[in-house]
Image (tube, rainbow, N blue to C red):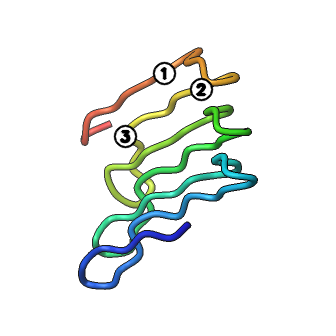
Amino acid sequence: AYYYFPNGQLQKIIPYDQGEIHGVAQAFDIHGQLIEEIPYVRGERHGDAVSYWKIDQLRSRETYKCGSLLQASYYNQSG
């Protein structure tokens, strides 16, 4: 599924398979820059989810297994 800001810019891509989120969901800022990627397997977070303050500036990294958070690191804007 695709979601858009009121100005028409892409906001989110959420992949579905048989009614469940399955694949990598992505979110973008108003300028079209990738700000978040979250992997899903059959509706549950699974793998490394990352978010960014801006291009190549990591905001968070979270590791999930079957929907459970195993590990997380969070960063401020200066790293």
Residue most toward the bottom? Answer: 8
Task: Give left or right: position of 61 versus 9.
Answer: right
Residue located beneath label 2 in the image: 63
Nearer to us in this view, 54 or 35: 35
Residue plotted at (45% across, 55% down): 56
Query: Element at badge 1?
Result: strand
Residue hosting label 1 = 72
Relative height, residue 6 to residue 72 (above, below): below
CA separation, marks 1 and 3? 11 Å
Q: Earlier in the sequence, mark 2 or mark 1?
A: 2
Badge 3 amino acid: Arg
Residue 29 placed where, x, y %? 32, 65
Give x and y (percent) for residue 20.
Answer: 66, 46
5 versus 68 height, above or below: below
Q: Are marks 1 and 3 in contact (CB under 8 Å)?
A: no
Label placed on residue 59? 3
Residue at position x 53%, y 64% in the image: 13
- Tell me the distance, in whole angstroms, between the alpha carbons under discs 2 and 1: 6 Å
Element on which disc 2 rests? strand
- Which quarter of the figure is the C terminus placed in? top left
Q: Residues within 10 Å of mark 1 (few under 14, many from 20)?
A: few
| Mark 3 surroundings: few (<14), some (14-19) or many (≥20) residues within 10 A | some
Circles 2, 1 touching at the beta carbon (< 8 Å): yes
Quadrant hosting residue 68: top right
